[in-house]
Amino acid sequence: MHTQQAAMPARRYDLDWLRLLAFGLLIFFHTGMLYVAQWDFHFKSQYQSDVLAYPMLLLSPWRMLLIWFISGYALGAALQQLAGWQHLHFVWHRTVLLLLPLLTGLWLVVPPQLYAQMWQDGVHQLSYWQFYLAFLDLQHPLFQDYQSGVWPHVDVNHLWYLRSLWQFTLIIVLLLPLLYWPRLQQAVSRFLQLAVGWQLLCFTLLLILIRIATDGDSDSRRDWSGFVFLLLGWLTVNQAVFWQRLAQARHWLGWLCLLNAGLMLGCYYLRGQDVVGSVWQSNFLSIFRFSYSLQAVAVTFWLLALAQRYLNRPYRYLAFANRAIFPVYLVHQTLIIIAAMYLTPLALGAVPEAFLVMLLTLTGCGLVLVILWQLPLLAPFFGLKPARTFAPRWQTLGLWLGLLLVLPLAWQLMT
């Protein structure tokens, strides 16, 4: 068992920048989901495009893997400062930190998305108040075809990351005796000192194996892939050789990402063409899946290398932006969908509508942040660390109250 506290790693400003990039891109990505004809979403605009899938594919493979890697690194840096029973306090604090915003999301943030989805499906013509009263009844017949969720029809939607991150944190803490086993640490160090190309190949093959093992279950594939990169981020803390070799590989990684992007987009196009025949369609699908997995790992590594080289320095508003991005992540998809719901009937055209959706979403996110800054007691419910510092006894009381609030959710997620 790991019993000695390690020195705190230097602040990784490059990972702070990448965290902002990855979460910030979600606004553009989820706005794009309104308009991609081939991909399902909770709400769809009347203006849909087949072509939009191609730029979306440039973001899709790596955006969440990058977030998972950064989360794993932050988790590893925090845990190596702890020993013994301090891990229990960490789990307690982490449970409140992650599940309190998730609880807010389940009961306040996500329901408008279901309201818009069911309205577009023609299931209801209710006011939102009437809908929400029905939503609070877990047995209401209105939701008989919308039963998936943590509780019946109470689903996580885009907040699945918070659910999985909490679950994975528990797993990591339980595995600490194994993860800190000296022989395993030595094996990990040797692996992370391999040439970047070998690591790239290993993780690409691992993602392909996950795809095969999950057999079309996209949620399981998403979670297992996320756990792999969370663990990778955790393991790279204090692995100086890994980061040095990654920085040295940034040039050829960039060329690989560019060339493989062309292969991935070409196969995506060809697999849907009737003229190439069913055998070739199957071959193109196989090549596409390999190329997609390769792109997921390659772009993640490339961005880590670039950020380490060019962005590992502080900026005046970086700490503020990193605090603010969590509430933005929490509310952005609901704002996108509600804006689209009211704008789509106006038939403004695809470009004006998309522009207004993003403008209203960014404005709404800004208003949420202003409100949370003025009402610090609400801030923890939206994952924002309050600007005001409370006395230690009040912080402890807040943690206990938060734990009591999230215990039913924690139990539901573990059963």
Image (cartoon, helix red, strand yellow):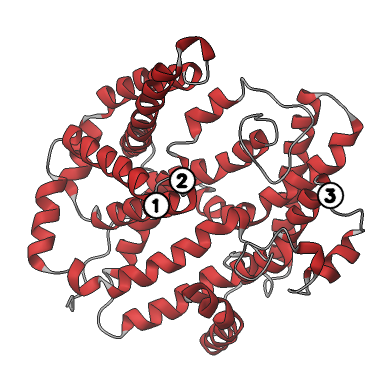
Q: How packed is label 3: few (under 14 Cα within 10 Å), some, or many (20 or more)? A: some
User: Who is closer to the viewer here, 75 or 296?
Assistant: 296
Place of residue 32 in the rendered image (x, y in percent of width and height, measured from the top left)? 65, 33
Q: Amino acid at mark 3?
A: Trp
Place of residue 39 in the rendered image (x, y in percent of width and height, measured from the top left)? 61, 35
Q: Which residue is mark 2?
A: 64
Q: Which residue is mark 1?
A: 226
Does residue 154 lie above or below 293 as drawn? below
Place of residue 301 in the rendered image (x, y in percent of width and height, measured from the top left)? 31, 37
Specify which label sits upstream in the sequence, 3 or 1.
Answer: 3
SS type, badge 1: helix
Could you give the CA–CA distance between mark 3 and mark 1, rounded to whole angstroms? 32 Å
Instruction: Give residue 119's mark.
Output: 3
Residue 390 appears in the rendering: no
Does residue 33 lie above or below 352 as drawn? below
Nearest to the eye among marks 2 and 3: give it. 3
Q: Amino acid at mark 2?
A: Met
SS type, badge 3: helix
